[in-house]
Image (cartoon, rainbow, N blue to C red):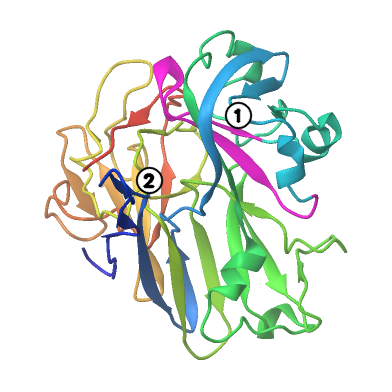
């Protein structure tokens, strides 16, 4: 897999005493990526370990009852952020952020969902009975602080934006950068808050601007064994892989169509496009009306090229949103 060093292994394969039963755990792996001086893109396709993976019994308001739990809030920390991922039923692949304070306060066998989070892939009010009896997993989000901790050489902090490293997100269709300060905090222009705990949600990519030198990022985690809800916005969005697999536009069914949620083919100015970082610069690949994907200044068709590299991020712009898109597990 291009630019990805992934070792997939069974973490545990033990024979249980007395019954010779083989027990296995999730598949784990790692990826490494070199970040150079200048502009880089980054995707984090691996997952943090599940805090719990069990069946949901019922949903009451924003609260999801979990089989086998009596005080689930005791497993959470107020200093961290978490999400729920659904592993079955009509909501398979959907994700919901956790209301940590409410879950801890409830001190019972339920996880309370954050109904106002923009990371939710469907409205909490629409869940109804779709989670009843379905397996769900709760795990911790990655954050900017986690990104910094994965680096072989910590990001450069400085009082000056010009001489500090930065991490960039798309927010409301615009790219917003957060710079590391000399005291180790991460801040954005116009705000004195520390954004070290800012979430990097599943399937979301980031830009990394390095002031100088190189650093190797190493991510260790489990491999998603589930379909993945992939809502597409009509805003400019930084995306990242849900799986440690490089894929092509054809793999993602990126082709022009006339439907309300289809991809749009057109000219460089009007067609849907993906921009990727190549040698420190953003390069645009546009979907044409004939289904070809052309790079600016290049007439070759890139629809079967691995433009979506798992360790990278891709800047995607679509004319039409699609809130219900789902990626099927590729292995």
Q: Residue at x 12, y 50 (%)?
A: 301
285 left or right, relative to 25:
left
Residue under the image location 16 percent in, 35 percent down:
291
For residue 86: magenta? yes
In the picture, measured across the screen, residue 85 lies left or right of residue 161, that is: left
**Depth order, front residue of 112/297:** 112
Q: Which residue is mark 2?
A: 224
Q: Quadrant of residue 58?
A: top right
Residue depicted at 32% across the width and 37% down the height: 271
Q: Point out residue 212 in the picture as x, y percentages from the top left corner.
A: 55, 89
Decide: marks 2, 1 in contact (CB < 8 A)? no
Mark 1 sits on what residue? 68
Q: Residues under labels 2 and 1: Cα distance?
A: 23 Å
Element marked by disc 2: loop
- Placement of the C terminus among the 4 image quadrants: top left
Identify the secondary structure beneath mark 1: loop
């Amino acid at each position: 897999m291009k630019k990805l060093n992934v070792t997939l292994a069974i973490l545990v394969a033990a024979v249980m005493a007395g019954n010779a039963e083989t027990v296995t755990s999730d598949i784990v792996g790692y990826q490494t990526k070199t970040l150079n001086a200048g502009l880089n893109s980054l995707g984090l396709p691996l997952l943090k370990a599940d805090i719990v993976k069990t069946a949901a019994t019922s949903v009451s308001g924003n609260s999801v009852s979990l089989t086998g739990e009596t005080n689930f809030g005791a497993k959470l920390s107020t200093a961290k952020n978490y999400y729920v991922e659904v592993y079955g039923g009509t909501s398979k692949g959907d994700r919901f952020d956790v209301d940590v304070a409410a879950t801890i306060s409830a001190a019972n066998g339920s996880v309370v969902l954050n109904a106002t989070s923009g990371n939710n892939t469907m409205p909490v009010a629409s869940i109804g009975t779709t989670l009843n009896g379905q397996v769900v997993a709760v795990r911790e989000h990655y954050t900017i602080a986690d990104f910094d901790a994965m680096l072989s050489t910590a990001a450069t902090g400085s009082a000056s934006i010009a001489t500090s490293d930065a991490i960039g997100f798309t927010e409301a269709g615009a790219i917003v950068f957060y710079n590391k300060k000399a005291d180790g905090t991460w801040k954005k222009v116009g705000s004195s808050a520390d954004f070290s705990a800012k979430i990097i949600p599943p399937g979301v990519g980031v830009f990394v601007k390095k002031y100088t030198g190189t650093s190797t990022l190493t991510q260790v985690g489990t491999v998603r064994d589930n379909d993945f809800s992939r809502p597409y916005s009509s805003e400019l969005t930084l995306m990242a892989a849900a799986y440690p697999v490089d894929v092509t536009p054809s793999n993602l069914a990126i082709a022009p169509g006339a439907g309300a949620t289809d991809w749009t083919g057109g000219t460089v100015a009007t067609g849907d496009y993906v921009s990727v970082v190549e040698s420190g610069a953003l390069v645009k690949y546009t979907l044409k009306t004939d289904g070809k994907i052309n790079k600016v200044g290049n007439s070759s068709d890139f629809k079967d090229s691995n433009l979506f590299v798992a360790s990278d991020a891709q800047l995607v712009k679509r004319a039409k949103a699609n809130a219900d898109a789902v990626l099927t597990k590729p292995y």
